[in-house]
Each structure stands twice: as structure tokens, then as C-alpha cells.
Amino acid sequence: MAGGFVYNAIDQTELSTAEIYGKAIADIVQKDPKVVAVTPDLAKSTKLGEVLKVCPERVFNVGIAEQDMFGVAAGMARAGLIPFASGFSAFTSMRACDQLHTDICYQNTNVKIIATHAGTSFGQAGSTHHAIVDLAITRAMPNLTVIVPADGLETANAVNAAYENFGPYYIRINRGFDRVLYDSMDYGFEVGKAVEVHPGTDITVIACGSCVFQAREAAKFLENADGLKVRVLNMHTIKPIDRDAIMKAVLDTRRIITVEDHSTIGGLGSAVAEVVVGGGKACAFRMLGHPDKFAPIGLHEDIMAEVGIDSNGIIAAVRDVMKMDFEEDDNWDDEF
């Protein structure tokens, strides 16, 4: 592990995902003098307080100016440093989009972006703080690796990977306490490779972020209640996406549902759909996420329930998709 830091399920119950990120960065900062943190006056909100405790001289506050943060971070990277630029997802993707495009991605600078308060995890703050279009923006940026961790331990793994690999990274994490998915960091995390968190042969649910736990719980319920075998894939890396895992799911189950705390336009669902269409194998397909309108205001769990991306919404979608008919034979020769 980079910097030698390891966390466990106990840490997750005591620390929010953002706090685990803050501790992970603090561990790396103490071991590598090239690592610095940059914040747009959000050190407290994005949990960089841990870094301030151990190496305050390596935390740079540029004020409420995400555009400036990216420009400064890009310059630091060009000078040989490894900057972790931390801000709210809505602002790192939209307010600073030009700087992300030109200063970071175009120049392929070694900047690591930690985008907090993702999706509707800060739901009560309203539409200005909801990040439901950021994946559509970031996954279209050349050179940028996009990761959406499912819980705190996966966030630590993502931070490890970003530190160990050259190039710009966009790591999208939630504001509050995520449900615990993994009990250790050693579950096989690899950038660009999905993780199967529940086996199944009837239908596949591909999820990212906070929706992975909801999908796994739905799969457990459907196995007990309906006898359905629901495969759940944690697609933590949106770009590069795991094409092999997606096509294997198509061939094995012929039914695919994607679920994300993001618009159904341009995010995980769109990325999976592109792979399916390019693979030339027909399947039943449905995308769960925010419809083409601004998200409602409220607590994260309430918003997820309202738009149908919680476990109940996934259960209903699985039951509905399972009713779709296919050709009676399993011959793929007539498919394109």
C-alpha cells in the first residue's frame, strides 16, 4: 500500500468517507515531501484538517476560487509536486470546467482531484450543491481517470492508486457516512476493473458510489424473496470502464440495470450502454438515476428513495426487467 496506510471496517463506522480520505492524504504527505494539498477555502469541509495537523506548510488555501485552485495545482504538478486538489464535486466539475480541461487534462498534469459532496449526498444544500452532471463532464475529458468509490475503504484504495500512478485523477466521494461495503482494503481493487460484490446469473446490476451497497442489499432480498440470482458489479472506475466485465454480464445474464446517484444522461449508465451497443449483443437494459431535471432538495436517503436508486427502487426495477421476453433460443449467431 502507498505510504503503508491501511484502514478497516471499524474505521469506517467511526469516520466519514471524506475523513478517511483526509487521513489517507495525511499519511502520504508525511512520507512523501512532493505531496501537497490545495483547497478553495474548504479544508474543514473536505477534511484536510488531518493534513493541517501534521504538515500545515503543505496545505495551500487559494480562497473561494476553484478555477484558481486548478491553475495553482497544475503549476505545482509541472514543477514536480503531486497536488491533491480538494473541493465540492459541483464546483470542481462545473465552475472550474475550463481549467480542468485546459490546465489539467490538456497538459496531462499529475493533479489528483478529490471531488467531495458528490451526487445528492449534500441534498439539503439544494440544486446549486448537487453534483448530478459531473460524471458526464469528467468522463469526456481526455487523459482523466474517473473513480467513484463505494465506501471509505474503497476511497483509501482510490487515493492509493491516484498517488501511485501518473496523470490526472477525479475521485468522486460523498459528503457523509457511507454504508460499509467492504471489511478490509484487500478485496482486489484495481483501476479499470469492476468488483463483483454479489454473484448472479439471472440479471446484472451495475452500480457505483453509494448505490453499490443499495444494489447488494436488493440482490440479497431478491434471492430470498423471489429466488433470483442477481449479479452486482461495483463499477468504481467510470473511466477507463471495465468492458470485459460488462460484456461478460451481457452474455451471462442478458439483462442489465445500471444505478447511480447522477443524471441518467452521460454518467455510468451511458458509459455501460456505449459498451453494450459496441459489443453487438442484444440485452434488456435499463438505467436508474436522476431523470432529466434538477434533483429534489432533502436528505440523501430521501432523495435516493424518491428517484428510485435505493434498494427498494432497484428491487422494483429488477422485477420489471425480469418480465421482458427474449428469443426462445440462446443462439447469438443472429445477433449483431
Image (cartoon, rainbow, N blue to C red):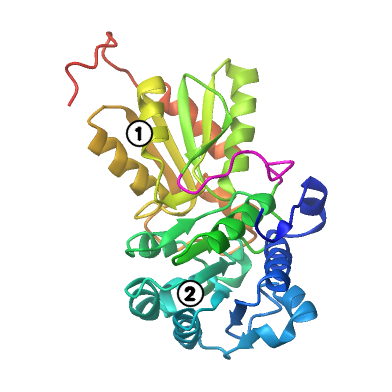
The answer to whether one can see residue 172 in this image is: no
Residue 98 screen position, x and y as percent:
35, 79
Q: Residues within 10 Å of mark 2 (few under 14, many from 20)?
A: many
Name the front one of labels 2 and 1: 2
Give the quadrant of residue 49.
bottom right
Residue located 49% across and 76% down the image:
91
Question: Where is residue 115 drawn, in percent x and y?
Answer: 54, 68
Q: Which label sits on residue 285? A: 1
Instruction: Count the numbered circles shown.
Output: 2
- Eyeballing the image, is 88 above or below 173? below
Is residue 213 within the magenta segment? no
Q: Secondary structure at mark 1?
A: strand
Is 259 positioned to the left or the right of 49 in the image?
Answer: left
Corner quadrant of residue 256? top left
Q: Is residue 98 left or right of residue 73?
A: left
**Residue nearest the viewer, comparing 235 with 313:** 235
Q: Is residue 169 above or below residue 55?
A: above
- Point 62% across, 62% down: residue: 298
Most prominent secondary structure in the magenta stretch?
loop
Q: Quadrant of residue 274?
A: top left
Question: Residue 188 magenta-drawn?
Answer: yes
Residue type, label 2: Thr
Q: CA distance from mark 2 to mark 1?
A: 31 Å
Label 1 CA crowd tier, 10 Å (few <14, some 14–19, many 20+): some
Up/down of 90 relative to 76, above or below: above
- Residue 92 is labelled as 2
From the top left corner, tell me how far across and down residue 59 is, in percent: 66, 83
Tell me the magenta residue range: 180-192
Q: Which mark is residue 145?
A: none
Q: Amino acid at mark 1?
A: Phe
Q: Position of residue 257 (x, y in %)?
A: 43, 35
